[in-house]
Amino acid sequence: MSSLQKLAIAFTVASLMGLAAGRELPPLDESKLHNINASDLEVRLRAGLAGEGGVADCWNALLELRYCTNEIVLFFLNGESYLGLDCCRAIRVITHHCWTSMLSTLGLTVQESDILRGYCDAETADAPPPAPAAVPPPPMVAPIAPLTGADEPMV
C-alpha cells in the first residue's frame, strides 16, 4: 500500500470519527434533572462562603498533591505504605470536601482514589493524639544561703 493510500484511509477514518462525535444530541429529558440532589450543591456552596472550605481549598489540596506525586507512585508501585501527613491531608480534603473525581486529573483511577482515601482515613484514625505544646518550665532561682560567721568575706 502506498503512502498516499494510507493517508487517504487515515483521512477517511478521521472524518468519520469527527462526524460521529459531532452528531446531534438527543433532546434533554427534564425529568432526570429533578433527580439531581440540589441540596448537596447548596451545602458545598454555603460551606465555601462561610470559610469552611470550598473551591479554593479544593484547588489548593490538588496543588499540594502535585508535590507528593512521588510518594503516591511509590505507594502503588513498590507497595511502600507511607504517605506524608500533608499528602494525606490533601487527599482527605479532596475526597471528603470536594469532588473525588478531581483525583482523576492526576491520572488516578477510581479504585486507586478509593485506596488512597481508605489509607489516609485509617492513618488518621490510628494516629495518636497530638502531643501537648511544650511549655518551658519556669526559671529556677537557686535559694541564697544565709551568711554565717565562717562565710563572711575578709576585709
Image: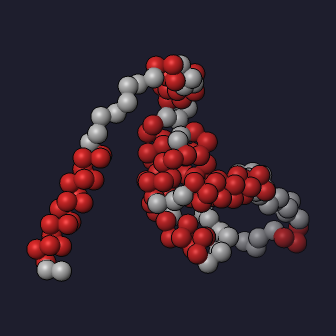
Residue 135 at what x, y percent from top left? 72, 52
The residue closer to the viewer here, 139 or 129, is 129
Tell me if residue 99 comes above or below residue 106 in the rendering. above
The answer to which quarter of the image holds residue 26 is top left
Q: Is residue 38 visible?
A: no
Say left or right for 118 vs 12. right
Say left or right for 137 vs 33. right
The residue closer to the viewer here, 13 or 154, is 13
Residue 151 at what x, y percent from top left? 84, 70
Tell me if residue 95 comes above or below residue 13 in the rendering. above
Q: How is the image coloured?
A: secondary structure
Q: Is residue 19 visible?
A: yes
Among all residues in the image, which is located at the extreme left?
Answer: 4
The answer to which quarter of the image holds residue 146 is bottom right
- Which quarter shows the N terminus? bottom left
Please tell me which residue is depicted at 44% across the width and 54% down the height of the picture: 105
Residue 73 at what x, y percent from top left? 53, 70
Please tell me which residue is depicted at 20% across the width and 54% down the height of the picture: 15
Tell me if residue 101 comes above or below residue 73 in the rendering. above
Say left or right for 30 vs 7. right
| Total tally of numbered discs in the picture | 0
The residue closer to the viewer here, 46 or 4, is 4
Tell me if residue 32 comes above or below residue 136 in the rendering. above
- Which quarter shows the C terminus? bottom right
Residue 66 at what x, y percent from top left? 45, 60
Among all residues in the image, which is located at the extreme front?
Answer: 1
Please tell me which residue is depicted at 26% across the width and 42% down the height of the picture: 22
